[in-house]
Amino acid sequence: MAGVPLYAQFINLLAAILLLLAFAMLAQRRVLTLIDLFAAQGLALAISTGVVAYGTSQPHLYFSTVLTFALKVILLPWILHRLIRRLDVRWEFEGLINIPTTMLIGIVLVVFSFNLALPISQLASTVTRSTLGIAMASVMLSFLMMITRRKAIPQVIGFLAMENGLFFAATSATYGMPMVVELGIALDVLVGMLILGVFFFQIREQFDSLDLRHLEKLKEPDQ
Amino acid sequence: MIEVVLILTLPLVGAAVLALIGERDYAPEVNVAASLCTFVAAAALTARVISSGPMLVLDRLFFVDPFNVFLVALTAFVGFTTSLFSRPYMRIERAHGRLSTGRLRLYHSMYQLFNFTMLLALLTNNMGILWVALEGATLATVLLVSLYRTPASLEAAWKYFILCGVGIAQALFGTILLYFAAEKVLGAGGGALLWTELNSVKGDLEPTVLSLAFVFLLVGYGTKVGLVPLHNWLPDAHAEGPTPVSAVLSGLLLNVALYAVVRCKVLVEASAQTSFAKELMMGFGLLSVVVAAFLLSRQKDIKRLFAYSSIEHMGIITFAFGMGGPVANFAGMLHMTVHSLTKSAIFFAVGHATQKAGTQLIDGIRGLITLSPMIGWALALGALAILGMPPFGVFASEFLILTTAIRDQPWATPFLLIALGIAFAAVFSKVQPMVFGETNAQRLPERTALIPVFVHLGLVLMLGLWIPPYLAEWYRQAARLIG
């Protein structure tokens, strides 16, 4: 790693942590721990954005650091915790596929993402380009998590984790999107979360549970 | 400039006002007034663009050219007529006790907010804001789909949220890749996502990255267009939401999402110099037409039936834009217009029919022509129009698309023809007994709002017989713009 500045090595480390946390979320059965893992991922993301901002002197990235920290480490986990308290759900949940198989599929996805990202990272001029594959892998892993979970809250956490991965892709490939876009995305995520909160109560009121098996009635009629 | 500001602020103000007073007796009128003002502003903007050409507004933040102004006018118009339809429709729903006052407030406020997000998506010059606005459109409609809080509507809304959310996350990744490619040419900062800037340097953008970006963008926005195999949310969301929402989802949102795809296609095609984007769009389009046509005959719910018909028509339009060239683009835009007008008219008629029959099941609705002749005729004519019978406008655009396909893509023509034939048989055989079948139900004396239906069908008829010269010129300019 000679020739790579210290801060870039630090970013690589944080990227690795991000990926590990994505795997940990994939394997986690308990919903409260899942939220903590999501908050930790948000923290890793905020720190790495801050380090990129410092290392490459991109002042607008400081702003996204603060935004990421406020939104993903404090606000969203807080909303999720509150929801869970209000809805009084503390169950452990089963995935559709058992954990070891899910992990194996996850590894395949990581290899696939690195291959997909290879041509792009070669074109990138940013010091953080090697992390693009990781960003893509964590998007894919969150996707996998959404597919394999049956309950509403883990699916939503998967959705939010996917947004983390996308944000990481944006910082590592391009030093972040233009400010106005970033603000818009943050607004959408927040509003989306609030709507989901309302929505959870509606589902619970209707079905007395947040199990998505109740939501599999609408199908094509058989003839 | 003032028109653009008005078009965007009026629905926003409407949403804020209706959030406070949306349950009052006069709220539907306020809703209509806000939509009417938006439409007037859109008409003024259209007149301005026709007379003085494309323009950039507010430090390049908004961009108006013939392509998006025609969609702005269409969106504002259908938004207005739908608000007219929703006035008696929602009153009847409330009288039947299906809605509480709080939900009525939510409905009116979200209706305006939804219009705002669509108009923002159309007018913005920034590909990132386009993404934000389209995601906003999903968020605004999720709670509208689940308005009745029935198990089925909650399921539909959940599916809609998750599928469109995941889809649009793919589009965000595509947008990041687009920015990544553009930043090399245009430098970092806000300028690198502006469509006008991208369009001026589109030949220099890195082709590999852009091709990859287009795959993500097409899958992402294509989910919202309802392209097969990403269409699963669409029939559920259309069938379970209130009918005015089905009308705007089908008539407007799908168009706006397709608009986003076409904007991206223009960039990718010029950069990659291959027919990659074209083929991808034609493939998805054709698959949607064929699959939707086959699924039409299996539907038992009238709103689901017409939702599948929307998938079929969006497939046709995607195929047309995929072929590209002046004629196909012209036909694609004409088809967008006539499909919006016809499909929303059909949903208005269907809404009244289901209210009268008290069910959405096709088997439960019989003999509309004796129960309520106007609704019967509206549904029959609407169905004939959407099936592409001459002299309606859908015939003209489908004819243009088919003849262009015969010339440019002969392999695709049999698929299109067979699919259209199957769709005709399926829809016609289902609508015919609904309109003319035997019934022993009572005539219900309820006020209906069928003026929008006949205005829409009248316009579609006019477009089939005679396209006003300025409109044709406008389509031609837009067709040139998107190559």
Image (cartoon, coloured by chain):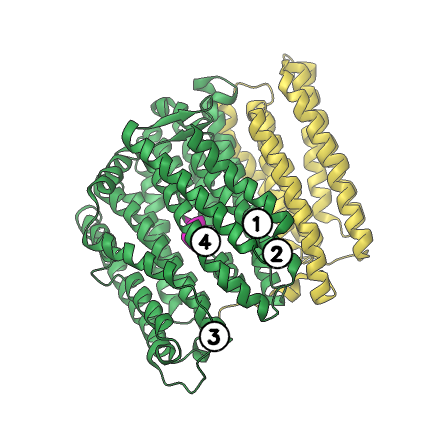
Chain colours: A yellow, B green
Q: Report the side of B38 relative to A152 (left or right).
A: left
Q: Residues within 10 Å of mark 2 (few under 14, many from 20)?
A: some
Give the residue pinned by disc 2: B24
Q: Percent x, y for residue B76? A: 42, 45
Q: Amino acid at mark 2?
A: Arg
B252, above or below A10, in the image: below
- Please, which chain is the residue tagged with disc 3 on? B
Residues A89 and B77: in front is B77
Q: Residues within 10 Å of mark 3 (few under 14, many from 20)?
A: many
Q: Report the side of A95 relative to B9 (left or right).
A: right
Residues A94 and B467: in front is B467
Q: Secondary structure at mark 3?
A: helix
Q: Earlier in the sequence, mark 1 or mark 3?
A: 1
- Please, which chain is the residue tagged with disc 1 on? B
- Label 3 and label 4: CA atoms lie apart by 21 Å
B439, above or below A82, in the image: below
Q: Secondary structure at mark 2?
A: loop
- Label 1 and label 4: CA atoms lie apart by 12 Å
Residue B110 bears which disc, if any? 1
Residue B248 bears which disc, if any? 4
Residue B356 bears which disc, if any? 3
Q: Earlier in the sequence, mark 2 or mark 1?
A: 2
- Residue placed at 66% from the left, 13% from the top? A5
Q: Earlier in the sequence, mark 2 or mark 3?
A: 2
Residue B233 seen in render: yes
* Mark closer to the observer (2, 1): 2
* Mark closer to the observer (2, 3): 2
- Please, which chain is the residue tagged with disc 4 on? B
Q: Amino acid at mark 4?
A: Val
Tag 3 and tag 4 share a subunit? yes
Is A77 colored magenta in this rendering? no
Q: Percent x, y for residue A7? A: 69, 17
